[in-house]
Image (tube, rainbow, N blue to C red):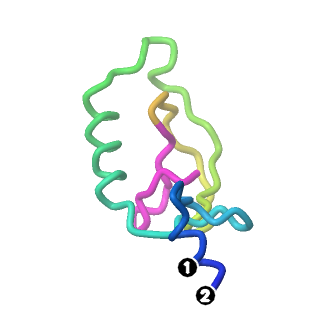
Amino acid sequence: KKCLDQLLRRPTALHVCPLCSKTLNDHSFTWHQLDVAVSQTPMPHEYVNMTVPVLCNDCHAQGQVKFHVYGLKCPNELCGGYNT
């Protein structure tokens, strides 16, 4: 707890744990903004059906997701983050 408090108080606060890469605070607004950006930005034809394997650092879900230059969304709908 003490370590986490120190990380969050730093002038350049970290958003993920430097040891396990889990998101340290609520990023639901950021994830929503990425959802909007992804939905409004079509990929070039050669990437439209491209999928890539991911591992979510927050919920540890694994799976294949559609590639997008803005981010790779967690395959777990309950998580829905981009910390992959």
- Quarter of the figure with residue 25: bottom left
Q: Position of residue 53 (x, y in %)?
A: 65, 44
| Residue 21 magenta | no
Position above or below: 36 against 40 = below
Q: Which mark is residue 84?
A: none
What amino acid type is highlighted by mark number 2? Answer: Lys
Labels 2 & 1 near each other (Cβ < 8 A): yes
Neighbor class of circle 1 (other Cα within 10 Å; few <14, some 14-19, many 20+) is: few
Left or right, 25 with respect to 38, comes to right
Residue identified by numbered label 2: 1
Residue 81 among magenta residues: yes
Q: Position of residue 26 (x, y in %)?
A: 38, 68
Q: Which SS type dominates the magenta stretch? A: loop
Give the residue displayed 28% in from the left and 34% down from the top.
Answer: 39
In the displayed structure, does residue 40 sit left or right of residue 74?
left
Q: Can you tell which mark lies on residue 5?
A: 1
Q: How many marks?
A: 2
Occupied quadrant, residue 21:
bottom right
Tag 1 secondary structure: helix
Q: Residue at x 52, y 32 (%)?
A: 67
Residue at the location (43% across, 12% down)? Answer: 45
**Amino acid carrying mark 1 in the image:** Asp
Q: Give the crowd class for mark 2: few <14, some 14-19, many >=20 residues within 10 Å.
A: few
User: Measured from the top left, where is residue 1 in percent x and y?
Assistant: 61, 87
Give the camera-side residue of 24 and 77: 24
Q: Residue furthest front?
A: 11
Give the residues drawn in magenta, as a range: 71-84
Q: Position of residue 24 (x, y in %)?
A: 52, 69
Q: Residue at x 70, y 67 (%)?
A: 20
Q: Quadrant of residue 34?
A: top left
In this view, 33 is above or below 61: above
Q: Nearer the viewer, residue 74 or 2?
A: 2
